[in-house]
Image: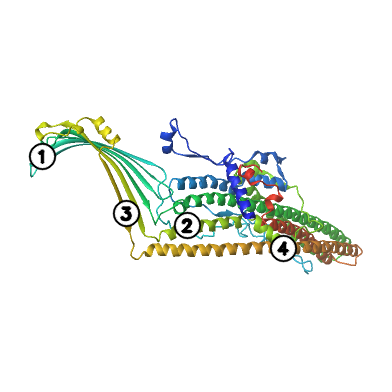
Amino acid sequence: MRTRQLVAVCLSVTLAAAQQSQAPVVSYNPGTIGWLTGPYRQPSVSLPDFTNAPRLRGLIRAGNIYLSLSDAIALAIENNLDIELDRYAFPLASSELKRTKGGGLLRGINYTVAQPPAGTGGPSSPLITNTATASTPGVSIASNALELAALGEPQSNLSVLGSLPLSAGPAIPTYDPTVNAQYNWLHESVPQANSFLTGTPLLFGTIQSGDASLTQGFGTGTQASLSFNNASQTYNAIRNLYNPYITSNLALTITQPLLRGFGPAVNRRFIRIAKNEGKITSLLFRQQLIETVYGVVRLYTDLVSLDEDVRVKRDTLRFANKLLEDTQSEVTEGTLAPVELTRARAEVSAAEQDMINSQGVRDEQEAILKNVLTKRGNEDPEVRAAHIIPTDPLSVPETESAGPIDQLLEQAYRERPDLAQAGVQITNSELSLKGSMNNLRPEVDLVGIAENNALAGDPFPQAGTPDPSFIGGYGAALDQLATRKNPTYGIGLNVTLPLRNRVAQADAARDAVQLRQSQVRERQLRNQVQLEVEDALIAMRRSRASYQAALRTRELQQQSLEIEQLKFTEGASTSFFVIQYESYLAQARSAVVVAAGAYVKARAALERATGTILDRYGIDPADAMAGRP
């Protein structure tokens, strides 16, 4: 029931998007005579706007972008190109429905959802996270972001049908009425092997013909054709009773399938599938929003962590320089051996190396986040020159707010749009399978025809005495058609029996197998949801415990360093041990930063896994579709 509500909500996104001028639209210009010229005019599709939203300029002050998490999410909704790309999926789905309503086949929609890059603060981050019990200080030598696989956008194909198309099934009637008209003029000269029929050895004459027809198909499978044929003929044949003469014909032919291709369930299945594709498009857009918002939260959190790490490295370098100055004084006074000065200088060099690496990783993360939050990346000189200053600190709440696992799983089953769209895909597979099964039936068509015929012309006395009722012009011919003076009726049965029917059987079997495969994939997706929820919950608990342990470790390492500094000033210790304890404290401070960031990201991962992250940040998919955060 909740899945249906989610589908209904997402369908409202489509309707709301159609009313927003900011959303991509397809315009069908009818022209001055819409009913006549409209079907032949080229549709126009709104061009993408690659101008960044004004919000970004408002955040730049003194050459810096002062960015809160809420601002980052708002910028992503306004500027992110993955979201902008998915906005074009709505008019694409609308064109799919328009095509099927005309009797066309489905062309399909894109099920790919893109995720923001991992960033330099992801699993391969070069942040120093060595244990606090290391005997020697560690120095990070960072690879570039490309080698860390931090720049690429992972993509997920949420299609449960796979890449193999379903069979077309029985032919769909053409629902758009079609008018066909033609005019022909012909002059012919035909030698006669036997002049008895024409009365002349060389038959020549002029023929003008004007024909028109109207054909249309209906949801029951019925095909109707109304044809109106006219010909005016003048010959030198002396045997004709009328010369010149006009023949007219008005005929209605109706073909109704009785087995294969019978009924609205089969013939309107593509329309129903296309409508479901509109629902799927809305659900995929919601999923894209979830992935983007989660990615922004993750990238922003990592930027804050990297900012904090730069501060830690800067403080470490400051302490190393202070230690070098103190050691220099002690060596000069002769209270310390010169070797202590070498050790202090080595510590300064190592701290400088860590500082350079940390700042570089932070700058790479900033560039990645800019690319996610803007339409033109660093092409804009003002944006390229500005540094992002995150204004929201990392915070770990005192108490855990996550509920029990059963409650979280139930929430995920209700809220996850990828699960809902998988169910709609299975419904589409079932609709398509009905066509495949119907195609197994023999082709038995009932054909009926009703026709009126007319003849009118000038009498040719040399040929005999003509019937007065056929004397006249085109008006007389039309009168005969209107009064049905010369009717023709007919009914028939066309039967086509494939003796082995292997193609239809193979298609039906394959589509049935693919339906079962889609059900298995839907189950896999459901299991994946369970795993994601459980993993995020475990990660939250683990990162909280790590954060609390890191806080205690940092406090103890601070106390240890202070004790060792006191011993150093009293001459009871050496710079080696001070450097060692300072390294331990730096590692402990970095561990606090990493643990706090891990908790924030784990919480966001849980909100993504349960499908509640949009509600968490107050995002309405209909507003997001229109480019409003």
- Residue 546, how many percent across, how many down? 77, 63
Q: Mark 4, residues whose alpha carbon is within 10 Å: few (<14), some, or many (≥20)? A: few
- Of the residues tagged 2 and 4, which is closer to the observer? 2
- Residue 601, how many percent across, how many down? 71, 57
480 relative to 628 in the view: left or right = left
Which one is earlier in the sequence, the residue at label 2 or at label 4? Answer: 4
Q: Secondary structure at mark 4?
A: helix
Which one is earlier in the sequence, the residue at label 1 or at label 4? Answer: 1
What label does residue 590 carry, if any?
A: none
Asked whether 323 or 55 is in front, the reply is 55
Reply above or below: 285 against 207.
below
Q: Quadrant of the C terminus?
A: top right
- Report, in whole angstroms, how far the alpha carbon at label 1 lies from the one at label 4: 96 Å
- Report, in whole angstroms, how far the alpha carbon at label 4 lies from the one at label 3: 64 Å
- Residue 88, how many percent across, how many down? 54, 45
- Report, in whole angstroms, how far the alpha carbon at label 2 lies from the one at label 4: 37 Å
Mark 1 lies on residue: 198
- Of the residues tagged 3 and 1, which is closer to the observer? 3
Splitting the image into 4 quarters, where does residue 194 fall?
top left
- Of the residues tagged 4 and 3, which is closer to the observer? 3
Reply above or below: 191 against 331.
above
Mark 4 lies on residue: 405
Give the amino acid type for the residue marked by disc 1 in the picture. Thr
- Report, in whole angstroms, how far the alpha carbon at label 3 lies from the one at label 2: 28 Å
Give the amino acid type for the residue marked by disc 2 in the picture. Ser
- Of the residues tagged 3 and 2, which is closer to the observer? 3
Mark 2 lies on residue: 432
Mark 3 lies on residue: 493
